[in-house]
Image (cartoon, grey):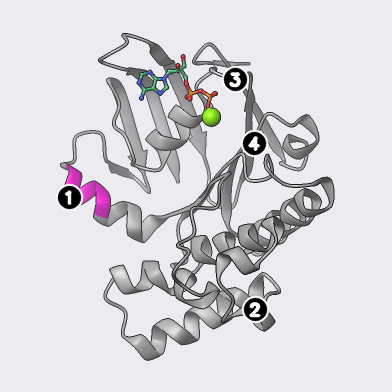
Amino acid sequence: MLKLMHASKIYDKSGVCALDDISLTVRAGEYVSVMGASGSGKSTLMHILGLLDTLSGGRYLLGGQDVSALPPASLAALRARRIGFIFQRFQLIDGMSALENIALPLMLQGVPPRERRARAALALSAVGLSHRAEHRPRQLSGGQQQRVAIARAIVTRPDVILADEPTAGLDPEAAADILALLQTLHQKGNTIVLITHDPSAAARAARRLYLENGALRA
Ligand code: ADP
Ligand code: MG
């Protein structure tokens, strides 16, 4: 599903080598966690895998397609179709209801309104929040907001779900709730890459990877 071949990322301005010769394959249906200290390159890796940034060297194959040299417009289209993102700070839009937030990626794909609503409602029910459809993000708890963000990530039925520290800002109970939800999504066949600095969160994944100074530790 995802394949990095000798991937490296050097930030032009700072000259920092954030990823150093990373080779990694994630197969369809796998649940992989990536751990590492602050500054080890976790977010950079997520940005690369999620087509939010491009490599300085090496290759990236997504679903068999080499995306290393695609122009930004093609990357954006692929990203919308194939990647579901979950961020630490939810990144929900405050002026929109939970349901509208979830439907937004479908709107950007040109899905008609009726189908958008139906699919968003389905995703909302998959995260157990059907009774909060019309609530605004600020009217929801942190854990509920993250569940809405997860619904938004899955509504497009992406090839891979990328979660960057999705439990870092939550209390232990809400964090456990989010991890259980990711587990359920994995059991339903989703491919998940979970980035975390929390060992107990990482332990949920069948396969655990460690980043150290931009390199994968065996
Ligand atoms: P993590 O998510 O593991 O904390 P990051 O991927 O955010 O690590 O950062 C890895 C390294 O790259 C750090 O040394 C960081 O300072 C540097 N870095 C991250 N983003 C940028 C950027 N946009 N420009 C320059 N350097 C960056
Ligand atoms: Mg980070």
Residue identifier under label 2: 132
Q: Which residues are magenta?
A: 72-76
Q: Quadrant of the C terminus?
A: top right
Residue 124: percent from left, percent from top? 60, 75
Out of 189 and 154, give the one closest to the viewer: 154
Q: Is residue 85 left or right of residue 198?
A: left
Mark 1 surroundings within 10 Å by alpha-carbon count, few (fewer than 14), some (14 through 19), many (20 or more): few
| Residue 111 x, y percent position in the rendering | 31, 79
> Which label's residue is closer to the chain start, 3 or 4?
4
Q: Is residue 9 above or below residue 114?
A: above
Check contact, mark 1 vs mark 2: CB within 8 A: no
Q: Which mark is residue 91?
A: none
Q: Give yes or no for contact between labels 2 and 3 (Cβ–Cβ under 8 Å).
A: no
The earlier-in-sequence mark between 4 and 1 is 4
Q: Local crowd at mark 2 within 10 Å, few (<14), some, or many (≥20)?
A: some
Q: Residue furthest right?
A: 173
Q: In whole angstroms, how far apart are the C-alphas of marks 2 and 3?
A: 35 Å
**Looking at numbered disc 3 in the image, what kind of residue is underneath it?**
Ser
Quick check: 138 above or below 213?
below
**Marks 3 and 4, how far apart at CA:** 15 Å
- Depth check, mark 2 against mark 3: the one in front is 2
Q: Nearer the viewer, residue 124 or 98?
A: 98
| Residue at (45% x, 85% y) in the render | 117
Q: CA distance from mark 4 to mark 2?
A: 30 Å
Residue bearing the label numbered 4? 33
Q: Nearer the viewer, mark 4 or mark 1?
A: 1
Residue kind at label 2, given as amino acid type: Arg
> What residue sits right under mark 3 in the picture?
38
